[in-house]
Image: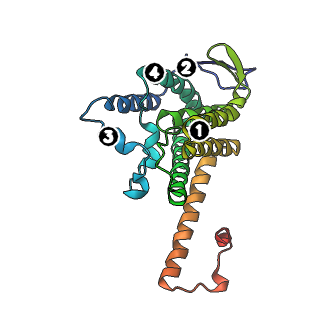
Amino acid sequence: MYSRQTMGGGGMGGGLTAPVPRDIWILLGVVFATFTLRHFAGTTWLPAILELSPAVWERGFVWQLVTYAFVGGGRSGLWLVITLLILYMFAGDVRRRLGRKGFWQLLVIAVFVGGVIGALTQLVMNLTTGAGLAPLSILQGERMLVAILIAAFATLAGDAIILLFFVLPIRAGWFLGLELLFAFLAFLSTRDLAGMLGVWGAVGFTWIVLKGGLKGGGMRELWLRTQERWFRFRLRQARRHRGFEVLPGGKDKDDDWLH
């Protein structure tokens, strides 16, 4: 349902004519395969354990915080084909700009951020209000992939023109705000607050990372910083648990983020 052209070379060219890398074809194949598995009685269990659900905190199914985005949704086959076409167009462009490693780092971490926000929001709502379990429908499956990849394209090629429904020309940068609006409109009809916040979080994370510069190791630096802070946190916890005493002179200034 999308077509696009670039303005003055400031955007990301290629469209449907540029060759699509093999890993993008694999991504599309995974989404299609998991959608297909939903429709056979003997295989419905596999998509069910991959989707984001209360099993994350109830049974420790932590892999769902990532796998949920790669499970084809339960809508009609026609809708799936349209969504795969959108993924085909945008994923190829983003992949060419970021490179294979940068593309997958961004996609997986953004999916994880959205999943954590959605799961935590739902858990807090269940504990504080006793609300029933929402389906987290807004962020499930290829919907999250589309949201992240369009946000990435809009950030990297904000001056490009996207022909919405092949007719209405819209500046790519506007899609960041439109995605937040669409998620809010979906919330109004589903009351899926956790799903909406998950999408907002993933889109916001994508914008922040790419705006800060993914090129030149920006994503790797973010990942290394996250690992470093996690290790420092675990070390502090271990010291407290075992009764270790840290001398004032040995305190690392980098630990200040914990206070």
Kind of element beneath mark 3: helix
Height in image: 259 above or below 4?
Answer: below
Instruction: Kindly identify which residue carries mark 2.
Output: 18
Q: Left of 82 or right of it: where is 181? A: right
Kind of element beneath mark 2: loop
Q: Nearer the viewer, mark 4 or mark 1?
A: 1
Q: Quadrant of the image for the N terminus?
A: top right
Q: Name the amino acid, label 4.
A: Val
Q: Name the amino acid, label 3.
A: Leu
Q: Left of 139 or right of it: where is 40? A: left
The answer to whether the residues at label 4 and label 3 have Cβ atoms under 8 Å apart is: no
Mark 4 or mark 2, which has the lower sequence index? 2
Q: Which mark is residue 228?
A: none
Q: Which mark is residue 81?
A: 4
Instruction: Kindly identify which residue carries mark 3.
Output: 46
Measured as percent of width and height from the top left, residue 91 is found at: 54, 30
Residue situated in front as seen by the camera: 54 or 199: 54
Disc 1 and disc 3: Cα gap in Å? 27 Å
